[in-house]
Amino acid sequence: MSILKNIEGTASNLLSQVGPVGERVRDTADEVIEYLGTESRQLGEKMGERLSAQLEQVPEATLKRLNLVTTSKSRRRTILATLIGLVLGAAVMKLVMDQQDRRRQDDRTRSGWEEPTPAVAVTGELPQ
């Protein structure tokens, strides 16, 4: 019985000593992971900036051989593609909306909600 109490006492004493250390280790690990994430982000940004600065100094002939384009040409292509996409998207939406309007009109006419408008002869006179 005293051996069991001695083991329980030792285990609870060990747990009370190890618990705070475990929490500190976990907090330190979280800080290290956050620090590594921050550093890797900053390193990636610096590498990207340096690479773009070096690519700006490369002659256009070399860029063409590598199938790369200059920043200004890339921006122009992006803006042009965006504008073309917007115009085509608007045209497609116009077609779709016109078809939906025609379908709705046909449904209204078939269901009796709207009577078809009779053809009126054009006489040139204003109605009284």
Image (cartoon, rainbow, N blue to C red):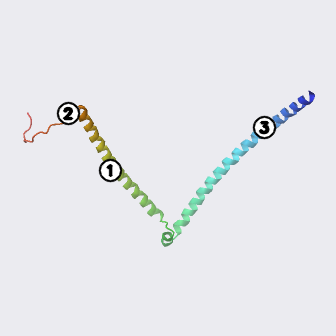
Q: Is residue 72 above or below residue 16?
A: below
Q: Is 52 positioned to the left or the right of 4 in the image?
A: left
- Judge left or right: residue 15 versus residue 127: right
SS under mark 2? loop
- For the residues labelled 2 and 3, the Cα–Cα distance comes to 83 Å
| CB contact under 8 Å: marks 1 and 2 | no
Q: Position of residue 32 (x, y in %)?
A: 70, 48
Q: Secondary structure at mark 3?
A: helix
Using the image, tell me which numbered label, if any, was put on residue 20: 3
Observer-side mark, 1 or 3, equals: 1
The CA distance from mark 1 to mark 2 is 30 Å
Please name the residue shown 87% across and 33% down the image.
10
21 left or right of 62?
right
Disc 2 vs disc 3: which is toward the camera?
A: 2
The residue at 53%/66% (across/down) is 55
Residue 102 numbered mark, or none: none
Please tell me which of labels 1 and 3 falls first in the chain. Answer: 3
List x then y, in percent, for residue 5. 89, 28
Callout 1: helix, strand or loop?
A: helix
65 is higher (above) or lower (below) than 15? below
Q: Earlier in the sequence, mark 2 or mark 3?
A: 3
* Three-letter code, disc 3: Pro
Q: Residues within 10 Å of mark 3 (few under 14, many from 20)?
A: few
Residue closest to the far front: 110
Q: Which mark is residue 115?
A: 2
In the picture shown, does residue 112 fall above or below 84?
above
Looking at the image, is mark 1 or mark 2 earlier in the sequence?
A: 1
* Spot occupied by residue 77 in the image (x, y as percentages of width and height): 42, 60
Q: Tell me the distance, in whole angstroms, between the alpha carbons under discs 1 and 3.
A: 66 Å
Disc number lying in front (1 or 2): 2
Q: Look at mark 1 in the image and give the residue it sits on.
A: 91
